[in-house]
Image (tube, grey):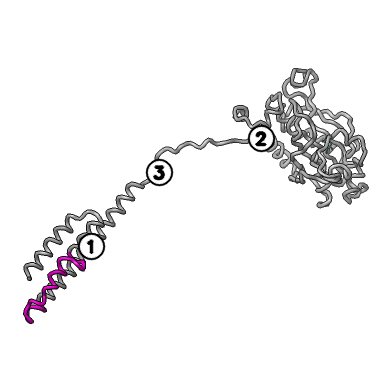
Amino acid sequence: MKEQLEAIRKSAIEELEKAAALQDLDSVRIRFLGKKGELTAILKQMGRLTAEERPVIGQLANEIRADLEDRISEKVDAIKERMLEEKLREEKIDVTLPSGRVPLGHKHPLSIVLDEVKDIFFGMGFNVASGPEVEWDYYNFEALNIPKNHPARDTQDTFYITENMLLRTQTSPCQIRVMEKQAPPIRVIAPGRVYRSDAVDATHSPIFHQIEGLVVDKGITMADLKGCLEDFAKSLYGEDTKIRLRPHHFPFTEPSCEIDVSCFNCGGKGCPMCKGEGWIEILGGGMVHPKVLKNCGVDPDVYSGFAFGIGLERLVMFRFNIDDMRLLYENDVRFLNQF
Ligand code: DAH
């Protein structure tokens, strides 16, 4: 029986050596150590042994079982380790390989010019203010000295939401919102989207952008307006740029003006870009109307201010020589890639 046991050990060890996968080890375990396994079968015949032989054989059988169990668990560890190594090798990432390129976008021409404009005004100590695009009639018109039935309303074809609420037609309501919240001195620009019920063509869009400006302090005069906007024009179009103020009318400024810059294409001689004029109109402005100051609780006997409004699309179109405003909104990358 001793020889039989040693023979089992030997052939189990041989089988273990051949085993390459975890399932192979399972079959070895079942075949030799299982309930119906070879070792168990031998032990069942112990009854035939003498009383002296029994403990000796029993001990040997236990020793062989323990030995085989150790060998199996060693082998299990070895196989698991090898599998892990293989997996790590297969999943290794080569970080030095060139990447698949992600096409990188860039700023829209409207944003390019708006950021330039912002930088220029930041340099002069302005902050940025904003207001809602869905606005009250009061802020968009009433407080800006454009009462109901005033003819100035007709020039701004308006998308009304209710009788008192609308899509703002201009960024000027930001003036009111700033003055209501903040006491002078005030120096802000308020860029944003505005809406008018206009048909789309090369120079019109129902949605466009304005940049509002507002300065309120003690002793502000028309000279400050002129100096500030001349600096702005020179920064945007170059040191040689001149500006000219033409009298105009806006209900919320008094006096009011439109401001032209000398044509940056021909320097003022006259060319197709300025339609032979030598000048290009870029903004409207004026001294904040005393009534508007009063509407916001600012005492016009103590404070004065100037305001201006710039059409962003016009700046962009002149800047990049774009002849159709629709191109700015169509998001055609063949167009946008050029800037
Ligand atoms: N809000 C005016 C418009 O949309 C532009 C404008 C003109 C704004 C003069 C101003 C200003 O602040 O002083 O036509």
Task: Please tell me which residue is depicted at 28% across the width and 57% down the height of the picture.
Answer: 80
Q: Which residues are magenta?
A: 32-54
Q: Which mark is residue 95?
A: 3
Question: Quick one: 315 or 153, which is closer to the camera?
Answer: 153
Judged left or right of residue 319, residue 221 is right
The residue at the point 58 percent across, 36 percent down is 105
Quarter assignment of residue 121: top right
| Dot label at residue 204 | none
The residue tagged 2 is: 112
- Closer to the chain start, of discs 2 and 3, is 3
- What's the residue at 78%, 29% (across, down)? 199
Give me the C-alpha separation between circle 1 and circle 3. Answer: 36 Å
The quarter in which the C terminus is drawn is top right
Quadrant, the N terminus: bottom left
Where disc 1 sits, the SS reads helix
Q: For marks 2 and 3, give the CA distance.
A: 35 Å
For residue 185, side relative to residue 254 (left or right): left
* Amino acid type of the residue that numbered disc 2 sits on in the rendered structure: Ile
Q: Mark 1 highlights which residue?
A: 74
Between disc 1 and disc 3, the foreground one is 1
**Label 3 packing within 10 angstroms: few (<14), some (14-19), many (20+):** few
Pinpoint residue 190: horizontal percent, then vertical percent: 76, 42
Helix, strand or loop at disc 2? helix
- At which x and y percent is residue 247? 89, 30
| Magenta span contains residue 322 | no
Q: Name the chief secondary structure element in magenta.
A: helix
Give residue 281's position: percent from left, percent from top. Answer: 80, 27
Residue occupying the far bottom of the picture: 51
Q: At 76% across and 37% down in the image, what residue appears? A: 210
Closer to the eye: label 1 or 2: 1
